Amino acid sequence: MENLNEYAKKQQKICVKNDSIAPRLYDEYGVNLGLRDEKGNGVLTGLTKISKITSSSIIDGKKVAADGKLWYRGYRVEQLIESLGEWELGFEKIAYLLLMGELPNKEEEQKFAKLIGECRTLPTNFTRDVIMKAPTEDIMNSMTKSILTLASYDENAKDTSVSNVLRQCIQLISEFPILAVYGYNAYNHYEKQASMIIHHPNPELSTAENLLMMLRPDQHYTKVEAKVLDTALILHMEHGGGNNSTFTTRVVTSSGSDTYSTIAAAMSSLKGPKHGGANIKVMEMMEDIRNHVHDYSDKEEISAYLSKILNKEAFDKKGLIYGMGHAIYSVSDPRERVFKKYVEKLAKEKGKDDDMLLYQNIEEIAPHLIADKRHRVKEVSPNIDFYSGFVYEMLGIPQELYTAIFAVARIVGWSAHRIEELICTDKIIRPAYMSVMEEIDE
């Protein structure tokens, strides 16, 4: 008798034959694939006061591409980061802003940060009984399993009142760094045969500091490292209601589901390579470029190899320069503009000036090559993922944790959108699908 794998492979052709829909039908019925119109603009499905993104302006009645802008609760994100002191770590402060809708005063900020620190703990034996059982290279799956299991320890898991959901969200924001690092530690020990050292989080330290401290055997980190990671977390914290994982949060929230199930669904969305895994592809591409470009200052040599990548002759043969371009931004990604100067500081501290030069040259060359070879009207610029993987590499963060670190930041945005959805509407999100099946008369 054939096994399940053999059966599934044989039946695949039948599924493809019976599930395929002619592309012309989408145009014929005016279906916006991916909830985007023919120009790539998102179909309006809701309203939000949490964040705002713009990438163009109207001049003489025409839409003109412009530098991208990102607001958190009415504040430009670069202004928020610039308002922090040179070495001030602002993750908790900006998390308060997104959750509560206003910046905290000094007393509120200290109280909230203290609360986050006190909540950064897991139930008794949770690490042993949940995280260390069935370790996996997929840290996002490990975290998702842990999130769903945490519901079993919450006596009010199903309560969707705003106060209870806020409590649950603050608890999860606090716990995410532990779930990520411990999930990796378990995998690193059981699957890669490495030593396992578990550090308890320090309630006096910030989210960025705890991540670095818990991940490193010697628990040491520098001020520059903490500041750069804190900045990365702030910039990844929120990005509008239309991105896939945030929309997932809205959809599941609208069904009346609990916080743990909702955040687990958002995690499942974020782990998809089309969403949260972009910086890993950048790192893989950069490693390939390093192996084929000998002089990082030689722009002609770099340009020649990037052309091979675009022509599907090199790297993964898909014709993409990863980290270039964005679904919304064209002229520039505001997060990348802010982040770059912090990346340069860290590269200098780590003695990675040559690598930084390579990144800078690719950033200069790639947009022109893409425009020439693709005959694109829309401008292309580097996005934040172009540099974030490089930063994580310099911080010694393993690639298995890249998307998990993204989740540590984005849980804040998901929480804010879940709360806003609960407050503003009680309607379940239910888009329409038109059936194009052939009716069979017996």
Image (cartoon, rainbow, N blue to C red):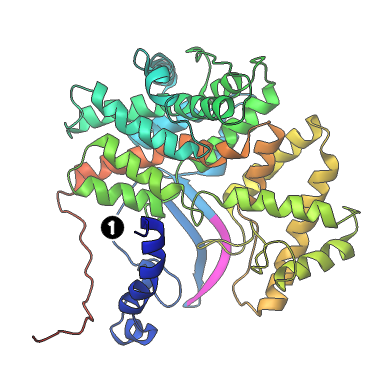
Q: Is residue 268 left or right of residue 137?
A: left
Q: Main secondary structure of the magenta part?
A: strand
Q: Nearer the viewer, residue 306 or 37?
A: 306
Which kind of residue does numbered mark 1 sit on? Gly
Q: Position of residue 16 (x, y in %)?
A: 37, 74
Callout 1: few (<14), some (14-19), or many (20+) C-alpha neighbours within 10 Å?
A: few
| Residue 339 visible in image | yes
Q: Position of residue 427 (x, y in %)?
A: 15, 53
| Residue 86 visible in image | no
Q: Position of residue 149 (x, y in %)?
A: 30, 29
Q: Is residue 159 left or right of residue 418?
A: left
Q: Is residue 363 left or right of residue 399?
A: right
Q: Nearer the viewer, residue 235 or 185?
A: 185
Residue beneath label 1, please?
A: 46
Q: Position of residue 158 (x, y in %)?
A: 17, 32
Residue that appears at 34% across and 53% down: 247
Magenta stretch: residue 65 in it? yes
Q: Is residue 440 above or below residue 137?
A: below
Instruction: Give the farthest residue toward the left.
Output: 442
Q: How many discs appear? A: 1
Q: Which residues are magenta?
A: 62-68
**Which secondary structure, mark 1?**
loop
Q: Quick one: quadrant of the N terminus?
A: bottom left
Query: Which quadrant of the view contains residue 10?
Result: bottom left
Q: Is residue 28 above or below residue 67?
A: below
Q: Is residue 161 above or below residue 314?
A: above
Magenta stretch: residue 368 in it? no
